[in-house]
Image: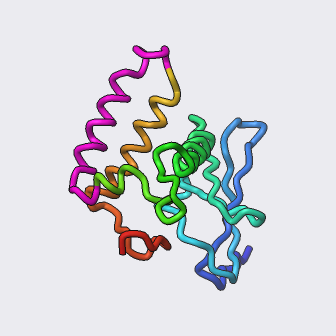
Amino acid sequence: MNEQKPTSNTFEYTMSMNETSGMIDFTKIPIDKVMPPWGHSDLEYMNYTSDTNKKTNYLWKYNEDKILKEIEDYVTSTYGSHYCGNNQDYKDIQTIDLMAAKELAVNFCQANILKYGSRYGQKNGRNKSDLMKVIHYAMLLLHFDGHYSRQNNGLTEFR
């Protein structure tokens, strides 16, 4: 039996549940179009859905996809909150921007991570919003401590 060698170095992977063994089966199919890079092994398989072009990781088992969506919604909601200016010229400026201008943002973010992390379970019980704030301040800390740049992020304020 002659096995045909793929003519492409790009592959599409599909995943299905084997009803007999209960194991996950991966199928590797050569394709000609370029597929985005997706990790280090078949176990890190990520599929780009055609309708949304967003990554879907079928191996996450702890609701990470739902958590990321909730975090995205929470962070988005903060841009219309009372922490922004009301004047049309300043409506996109947040308190954290002023803190950054005075080089206080890193310490402010760290302090708020401690504040909301330590009050989780103490104030209003196991309040999910406290954890959302911890995650949001950790994201801000990643930015303000230099892990990410404001260059080329599409915003024009403070340039």
The residue nearer to you, when weighing 18 against 69, is 69
Residue drawn at point x = 47 percent, y = 61 percent: 90
Frontmost residue, 18 versus 111 = 111
Is residue 84 found inside the magenta-colored segment of the image?
Answer: no
Q: Give the quarter of the image for residue 67.
A: top right
Q: Position of residue 75 (x, y in %)?
A: 52, 47
- 81 left or right of 152? right
- Where is residue 36, by image quadrant? bottom right
Query: Residue 63 falls in which quadrant of the image?
Result: top right
Q: Going 78% across and 64% down the picture, which residue do you hit?
A: 51
Q: Position of residue 159 (x, y in %)?
A: 36, 75
Q: Which residues are magenta?
A: 100-126
Quadrant (top left, top right, bottom left, bottom right) of the N terminus: bottom right
Position of residue 25 relative to residue 90, above or below, is: above
Considering the whole magenta stretch, tell me its main secondary structure. Answer: helix
Q: Is residue 69 left or right of residue 109?
A: right
Query: Which residue shows up at 53% across the image and 70% down it?
Result: 37
Looking at the picture, does residue 77 appear above or below residue 93? above
Based on the picture, tell me whether residue 120 belongs to the magenta stretch.
yes
Task: Relative to 32, say whether 48 is above or below.
Answer: above
Indicate the position of residue 46 as horizontal and vertical percent values. Answer: 60, 58
In the image, residue 48 lies at what x, y percent?
67, 63
Decide which of 140, 41 is in the foreground and name it.
140
Q: Residue at x 51, y 30 (%)?
A: 129
Q: How many numbered dots are placed on residues in this image? A: 0
